[in-house]
Image: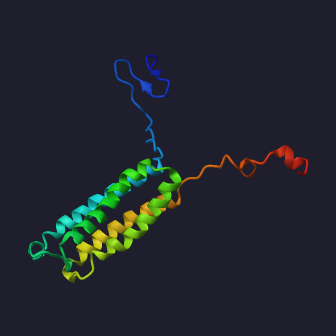
Amino acid sequence: MGTEQRSNAGARLVPGASPVRAELTALEDRQLPVQAKLAAAWTSFMFLYIYVDYLALYKPGFVDDILAGIVHEFDTGPTFVALGLTLVAIPILMILLSTTLPARVNRTINLVVATLYIPVSMYNATGESWTYFYFYGLSIGLEVLLLAFILRSAWTWPRTPSPSMPDLVEPNRSQIQRGR
């Protein structure tokens, strides 16, 4: 027994053996900046948004309608294509804007765009048969869940005290004591 030693961490050291770790360590949980959370959420939204449109191509008759120039009862002319590009480009740009805009503008833009995209996401199920209820229900549910996360993250954006109003944040004790 006289040959046993203890390491600094309290684990027993046996001669000729590697140290045995007696404790488990906790994983470090670092806070992500709000901008990174928003960019990740918009990226997830875009993957889902694109894949829902892609998987819809597998519905019987969908490709035939596209070849006939119709999507969701709309003609696939220049207006439809421009509108489609706009609807995809806005969330794509939100990935970049969420990481580059100043906090106040960033928060506002995320609140506005996420709010406007909830009805856009829900529109996908309009006129669809009950056969694809699960597909559209799941996709819309996930999209709305991501948009709700974006809204919550932007709404609860951490605030810092304003340097222009130091008395409201930390009052000068000498002025309070003198009755000013």
> What residue do we see at 18% from left, 72% from top?
77
Q: Position of residue 89 (x, y in %)?
A: 30, 59
Does residue 18 sit above or below 50 in this rendering? above
Quadrant where the N terminus lies? top left
| Residue 75 quadrant | bottom left
Does residue 33 sit above or below 41 in this rendering? above
| Residue 87 quadrant | bottom left
Q: Is residue 26 left or right of residue 180?
A: left
- In front of the other: 138 or 151: 151
> What residue do we see at 44% from left, 26% from top?
12
- In front of the other: 164 or 119: 164
- In front of the other: 12 or 148: 148
> What residue do we see at 39% from left, 25% from top?
19
Q: Residue furthest right?
A: 178
Does residue 20 sit above or below 136 in this rendering? above
> What residue do we see at 65% from left, 49% from top?
162
Q: Position of residue 31 (x, y in %)?
A: 48, 46
Q: Position of residue 51 (x, y in %)?
A: 22, 62
Q: Position of residue 56 (x, y in %)?
A: 18, 70
